[in-house]
Image (tube, rainbow, N blue to C red):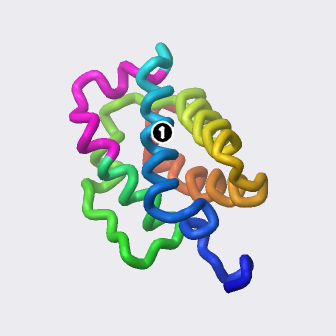
Amino acid sequence: MDNQKKCLFEKFGGDQQVSELIDQFYYKVLFDKLLRDKFLKADMSRVRYQQKRFFSQMMGDKNTQYTGRDLVEVHKNLNITNQQFDKFKTYLKNIALDMDITNQDIEELLQHVEKHRDLIVFQK
């Protein structure tokens, strides 16, 4: 299969790589003073599980269905700022770079993430 036909999920390496991306991501987030407060009351294994499903579906995996709560419901009371959202994206980008994902694929991922900003950032 040539690379043009592959979805982003496949380009990243499938299930295992997306899981690794999300695990590494939360590892960094939970050490970040700006971000970790948002997760103090969260069940992190559940958060990671749902985030992996969400990312897999967003990245084009037809076998994964995100079944978690509505994004607005999840985020509306967390007072997430644009600065925090940007930092979230920076972590994703740096981890993907460490995983040797191409810049083009990373940009595509970040564009997908950016489309959800208005469902997550409520502290303008």
Q: Considering depth in this image, is 76 or 102 the residue closer to the camera?
A: 102
Tell whether 114 sits left or right of 23.
right
Q: Which residue lies most toward the right here?
A: 103
Q: Work out whether 91 lies above or below 4.
A: above
The kind of secondary structure element at disc 1 is loop
Q: Work out whether 60 lies above or below 15.
A: below
**Residue that appears at 34% across and 44% down:** 48
Q: Determine which quarter of the picture holds residue 97.
A: top right
Q: Whole-percent x and y of residue 2?
A: 73, 83
Which secondary structure is most common in the magenta stretch?
helix
Q: Whole-percent x and y of residue 93?
A: 66, 42
Q: Is residue 41 magenta?
A: yes
Q: Determine which quarter of the picture holds residue 63.
A: bottom left
**Residue that appears at 60% across and 74% down:** 7
Tell whether 48 sits left or right of 58.
left
Q: Considering depth in this image, is 82 or 94 the residue closer to the camera?
A: 94
Residue range (magenta): 35-48
Q: Whole-percent x and y of residue 1?
A: 67, 85
**Residue that appears at 36% across and 26% down:** 38
Tell whether 47 sits left or right of 7.
left
Q: Work out whether 68 lies above or below 9.
A: above
Question: Could you tell me the amino acid type at mark 1?
Answer: Val
Residue beneath disc 1: 121
**Residue that appears at 36% across and 19% down:** 37
